[in-house]
Image (cartoon, helix red, strand yellow):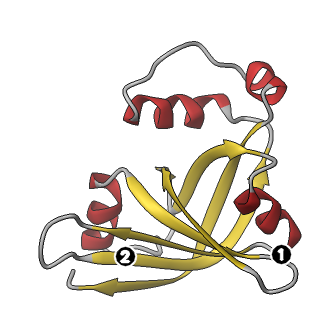
Amino acid sequence: MPEPRSAYTGPVREHLATHQAGVIATVGPGGTLHQSVVRYVLDGDDVLISTEATRVKARHIEAGGRVSFCVMATEPPFAAVTLHGTGSVQRTGIAEPTRRIMALMGRDGEVSDESLASRGRVILRISPGKVLTAWL
């Protein structure tokens, strides 16, 4: 069976895998834009973000699903990867990606889907449709 086709070239995957933070942009039902800086991990080509279900970004994704996500290097020439795609809110199977994101922040601890749900935590899953690069 052939390998699944990736949306990313080698340099794009490397850029996303070697950075820890990005900016998610969402569109609300009335066209209102919202951006926030987040930590993330990859799951294949998808970007996973841990947040609370009541946050604007989660509410926007549930309402419409349009998402943009940008990861920019911190050194000149400030290479960047921007993903345009669809987002979804995941409420089950969130313990493992949440642990990975917590590790990026230097935090560890036992988490379960149940404990995360009791605190209103969800995973935002961004599936890329279009990939743009700058100085990469």
Disc 1, SS? loop
Q: Position of residue 27 (x, y in %)?
A: 73, 78
> Sequence order check: which comes first, mark 2 or mark 1?
1
Give the quarter of the image for residue 73. Answer: bottom left
Residue 85 vs 59, above or below: the answer is below
Residue 81 vs 117, above or below: the answer is below
Provide the residue designation for mark 1. Answer: 64
Q: Position of residue 44 (x, y in %)?
A: 50, 56
Q: Position of residue 91 (x, y in %)?
A: 80, 41
- Left or right: residue 83 versus residue 89 is left
- Left or right: residue 4 versus residue 79 is right
Provide the residue designation for mark 2. Answer: 81
* Residue 42 visible in image: yes
Residue 51 vs 11, above or below: the answer is above
**What residue is drawn where x is 62% and y is 68%?**
127
The CA span between labels 2 and 1 is: 23 Å
Q: Amino acid at mark 2?
A: Val
Give the quarter of the image for residue 107. Answer: top left
**What residue is drawn where x is 54% and y is 58%?**
47
Q: Amino acid at mark 1?
A: Gly
Q: Position of residue 17 (x, y in %)?
A: 33, 54
Disc 2, SS? strand
